[in-house]
Amino acid sequence: MTTPPYNSTQAKPATVTLQTLRKMKQAREKIVMLTAYDASFAAMLDRAAVDIILVGDSLGMVVQGYATTIPVTMDDMVYHTRLVARAQQRAMLMADMPFMSYSDPQRALENAARFMQEAGAQIVKLEGGGDLAAVVEKLASNNIPVCAHLGLQPQSVHKLGGYRVQGRDPAAAEAMLLEAQAMQAAGADMILLECVPAALAQRITDSVSIPTIGIGAGPHTDGQVLVSYDVLGISCGRPPKFAKNFLADLKGSEEISIEAAVRAYVTAVRQGRFPDATQAMA
Ligand code: KIV
């Protein structure tokens, strides 16, 4: 057996598993997810009992300063996932497959394998719906856990003509519901819904047995995710409407710190207090 290039003594097996997350869905316990791109942030999220740490390709915007996620490469993602894996202990580690890294099933398999073997990821996320069924099937049949990202897919921003709410009209809503079911049938273990009307996110959540995680998708998904920089109010440019600055929200509290802001987000999600009407998209 070869030694993995990440530090296997530090990157201990996550105690949050797919089974844990399914049980949480069944018990209607909210799943908490946040992004991290380095070891210090990952350790802090782990201490705050975040269930899933996402190494998102949002790093292209918040860390690398690009206008979109499109320039992010597999090498960038493997590097940052490896940094996070060194610190994460309890949470599940999800790595985002960057633009064009899953354009066909074989390519997707090779790149997902890099995430698992070289970086220590435990699940990969890819943007797309029904047309990705063959890719999801290929990964699932090779025992690679998959999260399918539906709704607003930032890697398709030029095709979509901007970052807009998806699934607003009845035909588009029906198509997204079918896509979610197709992803589950293809073997996806989780569905992420970005910028989707709350009522549609609820229908999708009720129609699949795998957990759904929302961002700008209302309060009814099984869990919530935000870009951690938005939670702390340090994003470049205008933050999205669905985000909340939990650090600013601590004004007047006993402890004002980054870690306290992360804990406030975790508690608000667990107690069903985030998102509220202030963050509603549709
Ligand atoms: O890249 C990312 O951080 C994401 C979240 C916005 C869900 O995909």
Image: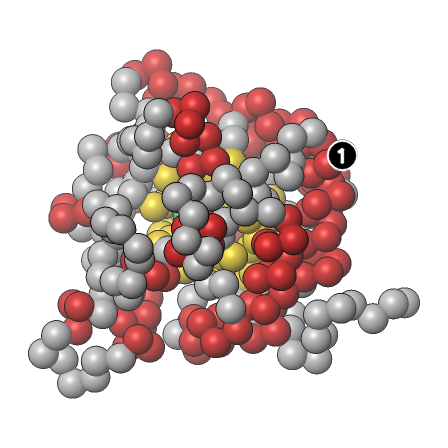
Crowd rating for badge 1 (residues with CA inside 10 Å; few <14, some 14–19, many 20+): some
Quarter of the view holding residue 176 = top left
Kindly tell me whether residue 40 is visible in this rendering. Answer: yes
Q: Is residue 186 above or below residue 245?
A: above
Residue extending furthest toward the left = 252
Q: Residue at x 47, y 43 (%)?
A: 69
Callout 1, which amino acid? Gln
Picture coordinates of residue 178, whole percent (x, y)? 47, 22
Along the line of sight, the residue nearer the viewer: 206 or 187: 187
Q: Is residue 168 above or below residue 238?
A: above
**Quadrant of the frame with the N terminus:** bottom right
Q: Residue at x 69, y 38 (%)?
A: 108
Q: Is residue 2 above or below residue 142?
A: below
Kindly tell me whether residue 181 is visible in this rendering. Answer: no
Q: Which residue is mark 1?
A: 106
Quarter of the view holding residue 201 = top left
Along the line of sight, the residue nearer the viewer: 70 or 268: 70
Quarter of the view holding residue 121 = bottom right
